[in-house]
Amino acid sequence: MRVIEEHSRGSFYAAFAAIAMVAGLSACAAPEASDTSASPPHVVAAPVTAVDKEKQPSFTQTGLASWCGKSRRSKRTASGEKMINTEMTAAHRSLPLNTRVRVTNLANGASVTVRINDRGPFIQGRVIDLSPAAASELGMKDAGVAPVRLEVFASDQATKPPVTAAAN
């Protein structure tokens, strides 16, 4: 008798599993062609516009900026020109000399465009060394360092490099 009960119970579980599986699969079935109430609503996508490459930065970098003080004044930069504290210049390790870079202070949102005329900074964790004038415009001169975002845009680049002391 016990064998028959276990066999009946097994058949019951098998039948229940089969019914559950059929019910689950029928929920996933696609609606029939004659069922129009199940069709998705008509959606119109926004038009795709071309992105102007002039408005997209070709280079971006974030990190800490510092500024070079009086010890660099009247010394020659990597471009051969003298370091002038009142000009919007900067040092970067790898960007080509005379590249114009937009520097944005992430702490206060201030932004300035500088020209790369030197190499550096040589302190780990820093991405750019600014002239005192650029640091002052960004509001970071008192702090000494600030978190910044660097962006190079094609529209900011000069068509002709400036004449340097080394070129004369």
Image (cartoon, rainbow, N blue to C red):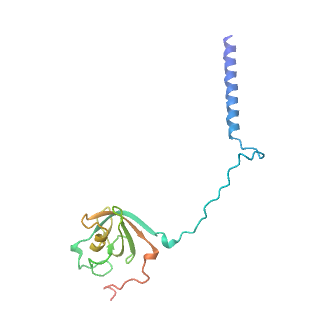
> Looking at the image, is 24 positioned above or below residue 160?
above
- Residue nearest the observer in this picture, 129 or 56: 56
Tell me the residue at 69%/22% (across/down): 12
Tell me the residue at 29%/67% (across/down): 139
Q: Quadrant of the C terminus?
A: bottom left
Please indicate, yes or no, whether residue 142 appears anywhere in the rendered image: yes
* Residue lying furthest left: 71
- Judged left or right of residue 154, residue 121 is left
Tell me the residue at 65%/56% (across/down): 43
Residue 151, quarter of picture: bottom left
Residue 14 rendering spot, x and y as whole percentages: 68, 25
Residue 7 rendering spot, x and y as whole percentages: 69, 18
> Looking at the image, is 62 positioned above or below residue 115?
above
Tell me the residue at 71%/46% (across/down): 38
Residue 46, quarter of picture: bottom right
Residue 125 rendering spot, x and y as whole percentages: 32, 61
- Judged left or right of residue 65, residue 36 is right
* Residue lying furthest bottom: 168
Residue 45, quarter of picture: bottom right
Q: Give the mark count.
A: 0
* Residue lying furthest top: 1
Q: Quadrant of the N terminus?
A: top right
Residue 10 rendering spot, x and y as whole percentages: 67, 21
Please indicate, yes or no, whether residue 118 appears anywhere in the rendered image: no
